[in-house]
Amino acid sequence: MTTLSAAISDILDATIQLRQHIHAYPEPGFEEVETQARLIKEVRALGLEPVICGKTGLYVDLGDGQGPKIALRADIDCLRMTEGNHHLAYRSKKEGLAHMCGHDGHTASLMGALSVLSKVREKIKGTVRIFFQPAEEGPGGAPLMIEEGVLNDISEVYGMHNWPEAPLGELRTIPGPCMATVTTMSMSIHGKGGHGSQPQESIDPVLTAAHIITALQSIVSRNMHSKDAVVISVTMVHGGEATNVIPDKVDLGGTVRTLSDSLMDDVCERIEKVATATADAFGATVDIELFRKYPVLVNDPGCTETVKRVGREHFGAENVNEIKLPMLGAEDFAYYTQKTPGCFFFLGGGEEGRSNSMCHSTDYDFNDALLDPAIQFWVRLTEDRLKVKLFD
Ligand SMILES: [Zn+2]
Ligand SMILES: [Zn+2]
């Protein structure tokens, strides 16, 4: 029986090249056409035939189809932002698009795992479905993948995110709520503009906006139980053109996060009431749009214990923890765990000598040193769930 580390070292250079290629040619949600074509090519080179799913996504099954069926997921889309990292040979070749969340690394490591597993495909009992999903950063590719059957007959689903803040080789996950549900908040406050010297003739939307911003901060501190994690951040204020003119309108924008979907209902209701009543007190009116994005990501306790156990066995007990979890970031993996028991976990990519900048910063770059442990983990998790020894 070959050792897993030998099997991985055979494909590691190709996996790094794949990662850097995807990094150089990023594509955003539902536009991952070249990425999908490249992944199809990689799958076919292994003598396998992928199933197209979720428009620009795909999946491939390995195994004899008897017994348990598990699914492993990677996201393939980039962010709509410009990469810093001018020193990188493989820096994004597309201005305004960049893999600043490391989905290039998620894709390459899962493709690496597929490559390693495909070499022992005749020994696999049960099914491991490996799938690549589009549009995680928005608008969300998971619902379409589910609609098109990616989780049909699947008993457990797993997903991984790199985490530069955690040291390389560290695994973090938590049972229950792990990541937040998000609501995007937009408001237009309508008043009556006029000369800056004669406020008595106007209805001032700037002053009204200031009061609404302040009043919104009372929701978390006065209406929510102190044990509940809730964030309301007003992040955009747009209004006015001249120092001596009171404008007709001010626009506000922001984000709302909670770790419970029903709590989000309550928070949204309070936002509507507080903003409407505050505007009314100043004689202004307000249009409010609350757009509910991804639900809470809830990890199944059994699947989470599995991930931790496999982590302890292969990375050491000292490298498995729940540090800084749950977090108020959001993930469309939440849709999968709504339907099928699963676990989303984080693998550290932080190393001395690297910037270790967090995902979504302009100088972030996926750490290629994480590819090997990530592939290892996917293979060991597959062995564990399908109860088959594939590698020494
Ligand atoms: Zn992201
Ligand atoms: Zn991400």
Image: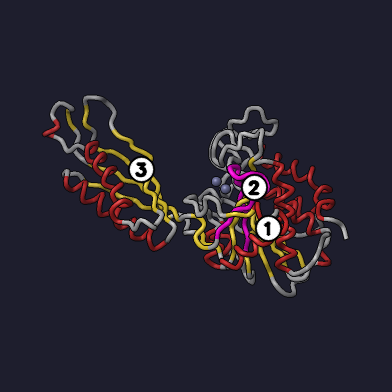
Judge from the rendering whether residue 237 lies leftward or rightward of residue 371; answer left or right: left
Q: What's under tag 2, amino acid-wise?
A: Val
What residue is drawn where x is 65% and y is 49%?
170
Comes first in the chain, label 3 or label 2: 2
**Residue at which label 3 appears:** 234
SS class, disc 1: helix
State the mark number for residue 328: none
**Where 157 sits versus 209, above or below?**
below
Disc 2 within 8 angstroms of ligand 2 (CB): no
Q: Crowding at label 3, few (<14), some or many (≥20) Cα neighbours within 10 Å?
A: some
CA gap between label 2 and label 1 equals: 38 Å
State the mark number for residue 312: 1
Rendered location of residue 106, percent (x, y): 66, 49
CA gap between label 3 and label 2 equals: 35 Å
Is 163 part of what is drawn in magenta?
yes
SS class, disc 2: helix
* Residue reaching furthest to the right: 1
- Which quadrant would the N terminus be assigned to in this image? bottom right
Camera-near label (3 vs 2) is: 3
**Where 123 sits versus 85, above or below?**
below
Q: Which residues are magenta?
A: 157-174
Is 41 part of what is drawn in magenta?
no
Q: What's under tag 3, amino acid-wise?
A: Val
Camera-near label (2 vs 1) is: 1
**Residue at which label 2 appears:** 33
SS class, disc 3: strand
- Residue 32 visible in image: no
Examine the image and state in which quarter residue 266 appears: bottom left
